[in-house]
Image (cartoon, rainbow, N blue to C red):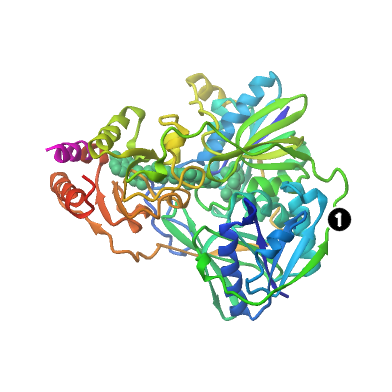
Amino acid sequence: MSILIVIEESNGAVHRMSREAVVAGQALGRDFDLPVSAVLLGHDTSDLCQSLDSTQLHEILQADHPLLGSYSSDGFSRALAQVIESESPRYVIAGHTYMVRDFFPRVSAKLNIPFLADNIAYRVEGGALTLTKQILAAKLVADVAPAGDGPCIISFQSAAFQEEDVAEGSEATARQVSISLEDGSIRTTSEEPFQEAASAVDLSSAEVIVSVGRGIGKEENLPLAQELAAAMGAELAASRPVVDSGWLEGYHQIGSSGQTVAPKLYFALGISGAIQHVVGMKGSKNIVLINKDPDAPLFELADYGVVGDLLEIVPKLKKALQA
Amino acid sequence: MKIAVLVKQVPGGDSPLRISDDQLWVIEDNVNFITNESDAYAVEEALQLREKSGEGEVVAVSFGPERTQRTIREALSKGADRGIHIEDSYPYSSDPLKIATALSEALKEEQFDLILSGLQSDDYGFGQVGVLLGETLGMTTATLVMSTELSDGSLKVKRELESGWFQWVSLSLPASISIQSGINTPRYPSLKGIMGAKKKEIKSVAPDSATAAAQAISRVYIPQKTKKTEMIEGTADQQVKRLAEVLKKEIRVV
Ligand SMILES: Cc1cc2nc3c(=O)[nH]c(=O)nc-3n(C[C@H](O)[C@H](O)[C@H](O)COP(=O)(O)OP(=O)(O)OC[C@H]3O[C@@H](n4cnc5c(N)ncnc54)[C@H](O)[C@@H]3O)c2cc1C
Ligand SMILES: Nc1ncnc2c1ncn2[C@@H]1O[C@H](COP(=O)(O)O)[C@@H](O)[C@H]1O
């Protein structure tokens, strides 16, 4: 039995969240006294394998196949299921990336083993593993446990572990694991990734950002935020629902599917603080939030918080700043 | 084209959330239940696909307690043709594999060409039921779908990747795809739609209770606060005065 960390490639390097997953896997390895190995799914993964050289790992498994040269849910789910069957790991660990979301559930269904997704922490009590995840838009958290003691698949949310904490060690042994994929087993074809029209504003270099969430209520209220931004010399940003509703262009969106920013001030108006938003702005030097709900999770991250109605406070604040 | 759309009923964002005595869920008394956000986009996408192809059927499917019927009814009032309700006596099943198994038992005879689901439920957020179901039924799958094109029995979807990147993927049918919010503009039900929905069929199915849970929530609680946030108290005017001072003198951005 072992702990197996699934490593994802991103721009030729190990994905940041895979490095965080390595930290999680290494910690679980210490707690359960199990060897910790990594698995690379792909074709010609020797470069990626080398970049794990100094990472403390028992083995690096290369599940190599020409049909895994580019990502497909069909190919990757079959390959990982085969690796789990041949290696019988106790826990399979990964970061909760968009790719993991896409194919891990298939592995769970193929092998009839649980996929405990998107956790923020774990603990071990009496030899049993309990995971913690956010539920109901991060307003509550839940302890979750796998039933039985067969293999189980676990993903961790971004920043649940710190990539700086990866334990270094001497060279791990690389080992090929054979994968069998018949022709025709991949029923999809993927085109090259692309970006939509480049952003008109570079939010990543903005000093001050006023960011609007669903709490703005309706499109007609947007000028309130625009005027406040103008009064502060700030750029305007938004959470996803504001963009989804068509009130602002996509390039204003902050978060996991939008831009990542780290301004001197991130002034959030009516944003709740979902993780997919938070990953895009948590590096901000100062965070101020106006929200009518005192339990909004973003208050936890804010340096200054105002519980109140933004429709009332924002116009007054604009006046006060102009005075 | 025979399309199923999965709709889950979840507590609305504004609902007060008080933890139930068994510490496994919330007290439902004052909770306002709504259709899961990404599922509302999935319903719209299903209706548009049917309208574009000019034929076929959209079936709204939900697994949950009796109140779930309202969510199915909402999809019917927007234009879905019929509903399937898998009635769960336990109102908060927390095992996605078990939910997917119940759904697949109820749907396998139907032979859908396409299953649309939301990307993630706003209550438990497993992010997997639609994909589990697709795999169980031997379908192709794609998640984070932001656009769909259907032509000559093949499906092309635009998938969202991380950090603002996208990718087009072609899938053979039958397929199960998970819809990301923002893909379209969901319609409101018309008065005629609401009236018409009353006559549409919702088939009730009992779940196969034999499957054991593969994972379970053991406790629900309020997250601990760790950061010291300065909460600016007082009347709106007092709050504004202090806020202006903070921006000018402490953070110094104005
Ligand atoms: C795969 C995936 C990717 C995603 N990517 C992103 C992303 O890149 N960026 C992103 O932002 N989200 C993203 N999301 C969505 C994310 O999960 C949340 O749904 C979203 O961030 C919520 O936006 P919000 O805080 O504006 O809205 P809500 O969560 O609805 O919060 C609105 C807030 O406004 C408050 N409010 C309401 N009225 C007022 C008022 N009058 N005055 C003051 N406060 C008020 C409410 O109390 C509430 O806290 C993604 C989700 C998924 C599953
Ligand atoms: N009980 C349910 N009934 C109907 N559809 C569901 C149910 N649970 C999940 N789904 C569908 O699967 C999607 C993903 O849910 P989840 O895996 O819980 O994040 C949801 O957006 C729904 O479309």
- The residue that appears at 35% across and 66% down in the rendered structure is B226
| The image quadrant in which ligand 1 is located | top left
Chain under numbered label 1: A
Quarter of the image with the N terminus of chain A in it: bottom right
Helix, strand or loop under label 1: loop
User: Is label 1 within 8 A of ligand 2 (CB to nearest ligand atom)?
Assistant: no
**Left or right: where does residue B60 sit relative to residue B184?**
right
Q: Position of residue A215 (x, y in %)?
A: 34, 40
Indicate whether A103 appears above or below B171. Answer: below
**Left or right: where does residue B246 sit relative to residue B175?**
left
Q: Position of residue B175 (x, y in %)?
A: 73, 38
Of all residues, the one furthest to the right in this rendering is A182
B103 or B142: which is nearer to us?
Answer: B142
| Residue B202 appears in the picture as rendered | no
A52 or B228: which is nearer to us?
Answer: A52
Main secondary-structure element of the magenta-colored stretch: helix
A172 or B2: which is nearer to us?
Answer: A172
Q: Label 1 belongs to which residue?
A: A180
Q: Which stretch did the figure color magenta?
A: A314-323
Q: Position of residue A30 (x, y in %)?
A: 60, 79
